[in-house]
Image (cartoon, rainbow, N blue to C red):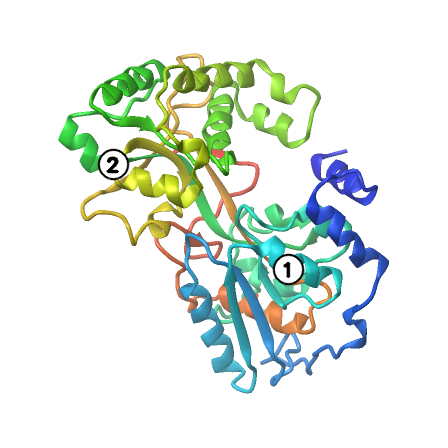
Amino acid sequence: MNRRDILRRSAAAGLLATPAAGLLSGCATGGGGDKNDAETYQGTKSAQNPLGVKEDAPLEVVIFGGGFGEEYAKAHEAMYTEKYPKAKVKHTATQEISKTLQPRFVDGTPPDVVNNSGASQIDFNGLVSQNALADLGELLASPSLDVPGKTVRDTLLPGAVEVGSYDGKFLVLNYTYTAYGIWHSSKLFTDRSWEYAKTWDDHIALCRQIKAAGIAPWTYAGLHPRYMSWPLISTAIKLGGPSVATAIDNLEPNAWKSDSMRTAADAWHQIVKDKFILDGSPGLDHKQSQTAWCQGKAAFISCGSWLESEQKDVTPAGFNMTIAPTPSLGSGDKLPFEAIRGTAGEPFMVPAKARNVAGGLEYFRTMLSKKAPRTSPGRSPASPWSPAPPRASSCRTG
């Protein structure tokens, strides 16, 4: 069994102790307020309307109001209403996806499009185990909105489908490519004559130099500590090779206790022992820690490529955000210093009990068109016009 099988079966058995899995059990058992009695919208399929969208059916879109903003979604919604002017589109942006939408999944009244992202996303394993997501296979087989002779699948880059597939069904559209790494201000480093370290020993030496200058070497989102798991795991993968990632992803016995993971954890513990972390960081959320970093209170922060967009309102002019790979532990690393984690992310889904499933699929077809506006600085859609990675390549060189 692979990792997804284990998690899905655990969720189905009630063993996955997450709020999402627990609340979503109502979807499988029916319960009051199920939307099966409500009207669902389906139009007539044609060459111009391959997914059978009902032209006057309303469409509800809920997106994660995070670092990528919401203007890109509003632009896609405008494209949708341009094609279907009789359709009323309701737009909502929230950072509390789980809190906002779990009750609606339970009572059978979910929106038509959900950007299930952020720290408060609904657990995907619970959603999949409860058959709460619509199959997006019809979307893949439909013609591209503006690439003649091509299906939507033909326009997607390698990995865009695989990363969102469960048991052979394409259920989640991961819309963007995200690079993860360690961020610093190149202006600060130039002004201080500091050079980004490529080895761990040099990184620790640089941290001592930064601390002596009265600046904390590191800060992080203490309320969302997974941000610091990213460089730790990347360090382990670069040391031991991609098999380290495969073992973790498949929940192999003792995967988290491998020599590579232990060595990486010991290395990163050094920044704790030497007090290289900004005081108060454990109590900060992602925006607070990132703002402190932008204010020059810390030199390094771990984040993904949405950081520039998320901090644009508070970033000083000339700050020059720069992303860099995690330092190499030594010459024995199986991957080079330049290896950096990249993955398809920003998951979008159409709930199986949405009233306008066809409209949701058409909205995705709009998002993946050549005409669709680019999302925001720091991320690129999984379309033919920008790079999208395969899931297996969690660390890529270059």
| Residue 141, above or below 178 | below
Q: Secondary structure at mark 1?
A: helix
**Mark 2 / mark 1, whichever is N-terminal:** 1
Q: Which of 36/341 is in front?
A: 36
Residue 327 can be seen, yes or no: yes
Looking at the rendered structure, the number of numbered marks drawn on it comes to: 2
Residue 253's x, y, as percent? 71, 21
Q: Residue at x 29, y 20 (%)?
A: 207
Residue 367's x, y, as percent? 50, 65
Where residue 135 sits, quadrant-wise, is bottom right
The residue singled out by tag 2 in the image is 296
Amino acid under label 1? Answer: Leu
Q: Quadrant of the C terminus?
A: top left
Residue 110's x, y, as percent? 67, 65
Question: In the drawing, what numbered circle is on residue 283?
Answer: none
Q: Quadrant of the N terminus?
A: top right
Question: In the drawing, what numbered circle is on residue 101?
Answer: 1
Q: Which of 94/257 is in front?
A: 94
| Residue 26, above or below 266 | below
Q: Residue at x 79, y 52 (%)?
A: 25
Q: Residue at x 43, y 67 (%)?
A: 372
Local packing at callout 2 (Cα closer than 10 Å; few below 14, some 14-19, many 20+) is: some
Q: Secondary structure at mark 2?
A: loop
Q: Left or right: 218 with respect to 142?
A: left
Local packing at callout 1 (Cα closer than 10 Å; few below 14, some 14-19, many 20+) is: some
Residue 168 can be seen, yes or no: no
Q: Residue at x 69, y 73 (%)?
A: 355
Kindly check if marks 2 and 1 are in contact, taking CB atoms under 8 A apart as contact.
no
Amino acid under label 2? Answer: Gly
